[in-house]
Amino acid sequence: MGKHLLTRSLLLLVAVPAFGQETGVREGGLQQDDDINSVDDADTDQNTAPPAQDEQSLADHTLSTVVVTGTGRNKRLKDSPVVTEVITGEEIDASSAASLTDVLMNYGVQFTENPMGSYIRLQGLGQSRVLFLIDGRRITGRVARRLDADTVPLENIERIEIVRGPQSALYGSDALGGVINIITKDPQEGFSASVKITNRTADLVDDFFMEQDLTGGVNFSIAKLFNNISFDLARSNYHLDEEGERSILPRYKRGKVGLGMAIAPVDAVRLSWGGSFFKMQRDEQLTSHGSHTRVDTTRADGHLSGDFQLGKRTDLSIQLYHNYYLRHRDKYSSLLGWEGKKKEEENLSSGEALSRISLSKNNELTVGLGGKYNTLFKYNLDQTGAKKNMDTQYIILQDEQFREDCYSVIAGARVERNSTFGFFAAPKLSGMYHILKGLRVLGGVGVGYRVPSFSELYLVKDDPGHPIVLGNEDLGPEKSIGLNLGVEYLVGGLFTQLNLFYNELFDELVLELIDNPDPEDERYAYKNHNIDRSYRLGADVEAGLRFLKYVDMSAGYNFVYGYNRTDKERLTSSPMHTVRGRIAFDSDPLGLLVYVRGRYISDIWDEENARLILDFYASKNIWKYFRVFAAFDNFTDTKESSVGPYAGIIISVGAKGWF
């Protein structure tokens, strides 16, 4: 856990560092400083490879990469006091990943998966304690507090930013462990297009065409109106393992189309709007007897934003958006003894206004206010399946004292009023200092909070043959205090990083065993409760080296330990260690990329559940605008483990064309 942007862009080198990022007003409405814009002057064509660079200039460029999530404004990496990992769009493109699940499984987050969704942990905190965003907008729809990352395709992705530690001072509830922000490509002037097709199989003979994925997009402009259209189409058959008992891949069909538009009628104004529609049908719990569950998922969203430069010292950004989520499940298996359609439907409407004021050359003040209205209808909320709603209003105040290439100190707070739980205050302090060129220290302390979800409050799960799970309307919000301290060093082709963290969690929400309400029912029953205190602590260590012109190596080790102070026992769900390594050959002149990546994942107290996963990838440019590739994921043939997602050998082949 904790691979930094520098590791991603400089040392892992799946392709090349991203060029042309963040031109103009973007994600949060900030007009970039002149020195930030100057970084991108070298090459802004996202469809062609940039020229090769020597080691020192590559390091300088990487340090100048722009990030936004950790501070709420566009900042160069070397000036940001928040530890940020970035997975670039080029890196995603040069992989076999087909969804957010695939990406997060391959990189520095702790990841497990089951039919209920994707379980992501940042610094020992997971489930709904990690906030997912798209361009700063919340993603709706969780099952058992988990986001199904397979319902977030990867078309039109500029980069993914991962920020660890409590971020409630900027983003409010759910950001106790950190934030994963998926940033899409901004519509640009000119014309470009790309198409990528991938075929996957686990059996070259009997089921070669097991899964296919087709993605692409078109960017074009009409006068001052910039447009971006993207699409993602995929389908798969289910493929049973050698014992014929479980499917390596679910059977599904999915499609997504997105539209983004932007116009800058004058230099000081930029307006943008757009939306997307996603549909997925998937069979779950697959066995040799067929599928037990069919789930239809629909996502739709729309947004409108305006960015305004109000003189030399002040800018204003305004954003309105709506997210819709529908999960429709049709149980038809006679093994379960009953039939019936199960449905949940969620809507989230939100609006926010942020103003940034330059008080001096080295001081910037951010003031913001906003609100959101969230509703959920679910078939098993309460005894009646009632519709629930919750509204929130908030203000944000943040001040940064900085000197570029030297130091940055940010102090901020968010005060939020929730219609169910009242007021919250979440302060945060972050700082960074450059000791020497390429060597800096950074750290932060912050307060986080999480409002209980509708399901935790009101759920009544009473399926035949399964344990009973009950909500609890007396639950209180979770609160946390998190600390991070890091040291990193980057000069030329050498990079090292150490990040230490500690999270103290108060009033943690857990499921506890209770007496069955029906004395004649022998099933187990569980209910959500608050426990007093628990903590997670750990360390992330990263190192990498470019030791030849086209060869890079990187390695990392992550450790997290959790302890329940209330019951005075170790948290078995958190302790875990991960070892990662990668060696890559990447030659622009040859148009060739080859890498081998390995991950060793284990509960540090239970080595029997350890997993060793090795992946291989190769791609070759056979024409200026055409590339072929092949990947062998998990060729160590790990079949099943309680640590990490279920997997077998997956072989992928494909091609991409662009112009």
Image (cartoon, grey):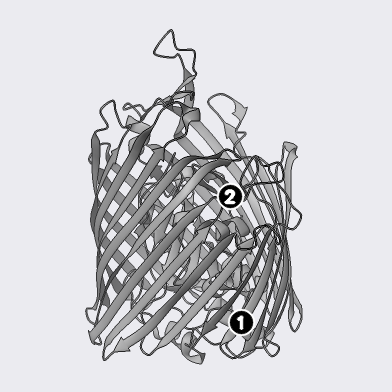
Q: 428 or 453, which is in the foreground?
A: 453
Q: Quadrant of residue 652?
A: bottom right
- The count of marks equals 2
Q: 589 or 51, which is in the foreground?
A: 589
Check if mark 1's residue and mark 2's residue have beta carbons within 8 Å: no
Query: Could you tell me if residue 343 is visible in this image?
Result: yes
* Residue for point 62% across, 83% down: 58
**Residue 455 pos. (x, y %):** 36, 35
**Residue 183 pos. (x, y %):** 43, 68
Query: Could you tell me if residue 476 is visible in this image?
Result: no
Question: Which secondary structure, mark 1?
Answer: strand
**Residue 81 pos. (x, y %):** 49, 64
**Residue 430 pos. (x, y %):** 47, 59
The answer to whether residue 435 is above or below residue 420 is: below
Q: Amino acid at mark 1?
A: Arg
Looking at the figure, which quarter contains the N terminus?
bottom right
Q: 89 or 191, which is in the foreground?
A: 191
* Residue for point 46% across, 34% down: 508
Q: CA distance from mark 1 to mark 2?
A: 30 Å
Dot 2: within a 10 Å radius of its alpha carbon, few (fewer than 14), some, or many (20 or more) residues? many
* Residue for point 60% across, 91% down: 51
Question: Which secondary structure, mark 2?
Answer: strand
- 149 vs 278, left or right, is right
Q: Amino acid at mark 2?
A: Phe
Residue, disc 1: 627
Residue, disc 2: 111
User: Which numbered circle lies on residue 382?
Assistant: none
